[in-house]
Every structure is written in structure tokens, then in C-alpha cells.
Image (spheres, grey):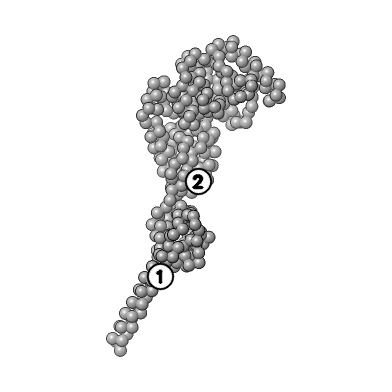
Amino acid sequence: MKNFNSRAYLYIAGMGMILIIALTVFYAMTSVSDSESTEYIYIDDNDTQDSVIAKLQPYANPIGMAGLKTLLRHSDYKENIRTGRYAINPDDGAVAVFHRIKSGQQTTISMVVPEARTMERLAELLSKKLMIDSTTIINALKDEDVCHKLGYDTCNIAAMFVPNTYDMYWDVSVDKLLQRMKKEHDRFWKGDREAKAAQINLTPTEVATLASIIDEETADNAEKPMIAGMYINRLRVGMPLQADPTIKFALKQFELKRIYNKLLNTDSPFNTYANQGLPPGPIKIASIRGIDAVLNHVKHDYLYMCAKADFSGSHVFAKTYKEHLKNAAEYTQELNARGIQ
């Protein structure tokens, strides 16, 4: 009787093992999804095993879902949930998907760093692509200790960001995000750009600051080196930059069409009418074209510029204040004629 029980136990165990192997092979060979394209699920730090299953449900067919539930619930996944963005490919079986999310084999996202005007706007846009929220990002960017460790302060941290598209893990922490941006900044500047900045006696941060002003002066990339040359001339002779975009930034009124004299006394370190030299930091995330315009500026003798009265978006340049007043009068006359306040 004892031998019979032993044989029965071994038989049942053997059949159970065969069943497990058969199910594993079946789930490995059977596609989870009926979709012809790759789908993605996002697992965050608030997810549980059940919520992960719920997130998988829309992308899995009945057989695939049964396999995923079996694998997830008969493993230690509940205690080892890994955040991330995970791909579900058209030919993936349940075993492949299970192994991917259990081992944390996530897929990167393409994160665009935009030419944002404010750090608040930058945080908002980045948070739409990442697991971290905008509050976490902006709190870090306004933290003097965080900025100091990266080599910046809260006024010039915008200079660290180079607008581009980067491959990034969706669940990246804010610290690793900023470290990555610093690494990309250093890679961007290393070599020719750094050398050219030194030749004009500006640091990369100062170049980005001036470039941000030029970006706000014009959307015409072809004209940016000309404008850069004018501002560099002003810096060299100790003349205030008197850049209207810095007034808009100081007031946080970017929609202003005209800068009246009463606004020129705005109390702000970013006011380049009231303060000599460059402002304490960029007034937006400078474009690459703006940065390169400063580094490769046109050398000329102009000290003044004014928007053209034809509203083409281009500027007319002047060497003397007398010439400039004439150009400014024509532009002001056209503003009044068009009723622009």
C-alpha cells in the first residue's frame, strides 16, 4: 500500500510537471496581442499586481490574458513590481511579456526638451512624457542646493538644457533626469563651441543667456548672427543691452506688443535697461541656432537695431543713436497707424 501511494504521488507530480511545461510552452508560443503594431503599458509606483493586470487587459486577447494572469499570480511579482514603459509586440507570447515586466526590461521614450520660456512651462511639458510630475521637477529646479550641485543657480539653470530629443526611461527620477541633462549639456559644448565661447570672453551659460534674448528678438535664424553681433558690440563698449524681451520676461507678460517707457523702470535683475551687462540667466531655453548665432556672430559696427516698419519680422540696424531714432520713429508711426497698443 505504501509503494502504491508513492507511485501515485510520483505519477500526480509528474503529470503536474508535464501540465506546467505544456502550459508554459503554449503561453510562450501563443501571441498575447492580436494587434499588428507594438503597444505599450506604463507601470508606475502606485501600481499593484491587480492594476497591472487591468492595464494589460486592453492589449491582450483572452488566451494571452489567461496566460499572463497565471504567470503573474503564481510568481513573486506582487512583491517585486517594477515601474517603467513596457512594449507588447505583435508576436510576443505571455511568457515573453511576463519576463519583460518582471525583470524591468523597459523601452525608452523619446523626450523632447523644448525651447520653453519658463521653468514652470518646461516642467509641465516634461511631466507629460515622464512618470514624475511637474511639481517634482519645478521644485528641483527652484532648489538652490540641487542647482548648485549641477554648477548653476535658480536664475541660470535654464542654460543647462539643450533643446533636442533624447532617449530616456519613462520612470527616470528627477535627480537622474537633471544629471542626464547636465551630461548632454557638457557633450554639446565640448570642443568647438566651448573654444569659440572663450574667444569672445563668454562662458557657455553667458552664451546661452545672450542667445535666449536673440531668440526672443527674432524667429529669423538667418538674422540671428547679425543681432548677436550688435549685442556683443554693446557688451564690449559697456553699453546696456536694452533688450525689450528682458522686460517682458521680468514682468512675465510675454504677450506685450509694445514696451512703453514706463515699463523700462521695472524692478528686476533681468531688466537690461536698468542693469548693465547680461541678465543673471536665460529668459528662455536658448535654441541651438541662437547659441550658434552668438558663437558665429557677424562682426560689424552696429550698436542699435529696430524692427522694420514693414512688419516683416526683420530689423534695421544703425551705428549712431541719431540714425536709430529715425528708424524707431518710422516703426512707432506704423504701430500707431495699425492701432497696436
Count of labels in the image? 2
The kind of residue on which mark 1 rests is Leu
Q: Is residue 54 left or right of residue 329?
A: left
For label 2, count other residues whose C-alpha is less than 10 Å away and answer few (under 14), some (14-19) or many (20+).
some
Task: Give the camera-side residue of 331 and 36.
Answer: 36
Q: Is residue 74 above or below residue 211?
A: below
**Does 321 sit above or below residue 23?**
above
Please name the residue shown 70% across and 24% down the image. 338
| Label drawn at residue 129 | 2
- Dot 1 corresponds to which residue? 23
Residue 13, placed above or below residue 246: below
- Relative image position of residue 274 (x, y in whole percent): 55, 20
Locate residue 3: give its quadrant: bottom left
Residue at the (45%, 35%) spot, across then down:
162
User: Residue 107: x, y in percent?
Assistant: 43, 51
Question: Percent x, y for residue 100?
Answer: 40, 57
Give the quarter of the figure containing the N terminus. Answer: bottom left
* Drawn side of residue 61 relative to residue 18, left or right: right
Q: Position of residue 223 (x, y in %)?
A: 52, 23
Disc 2 marks a residue whose amino acid type is: Lys
- Do residues under tags 1 and 2 come within 8 Å of each other at their CB atoms? no
